[in-house]
Image (cartoon, rainbow, N blue to C red):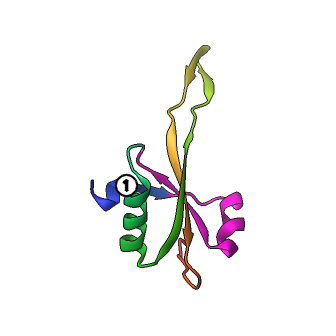
Amino acid sequence: MNIYDVIQEPLISEKGSKHEKQRKYYFKVSPKAQKHEIQDAVEKIFNVKVKKVNTMIVGGKWKRVRFRPGKTAEWKKAIVTLKEGQKISLT
């Protein structure tokens, strides 16, 4: 799997920006990506050293479109913790 297929996009939100002081960054990743693949991709793309990777599956939500119920797609989120002194500039 290509490193740019693993990391789909960074998640920039108020909740995520609170954790930047703790060197934690949030990414939307491929559902098939494993932790070591995510770690390698972040290290190569952003040229940093990764300490830890946590992943979770974010379940889809029930929505209604034109009076018909449906469910949005599930996706995978990764929380990447960097080693001391490392930083990613996402803006």
Q: SS of the residue at dot 1?
A: helix
Residue displayed at 71% across by 60% down: 14
What segment carries the magenta color? 10-30
Q: How many marks?
A: 1
**Label 1, on which residue?**
6
Please say whether residue 61 is one of the residues in the magenta stretch: no
Q: Nearer the viewer, residue 67 or 70?
A: 70
Find residue 77 and report its horizontal and vertical position in percent: 53, 50
Instruction: State left or right for residue 23 relative to residue 37.
Output: right
Q: Is residue 30 above or below residue 74?
A: below
Q: Nearer the viewer, residue 62 or 64?
A: 62
Q: Is residue 20 above or below residue 1?
A: below
Q: Is residue 77 above or below residue 48?
A: above
Residue extending farthest top: 67
| Label 1: few (<14), some (14–19) or many (≥20) C-alpha neighbours in 10 Å | many
Please say whether residue 19 is one of the residues in the magenta stretch: yes
Find residue 43 and report its horizontal and vertical position in percent: 41, 72
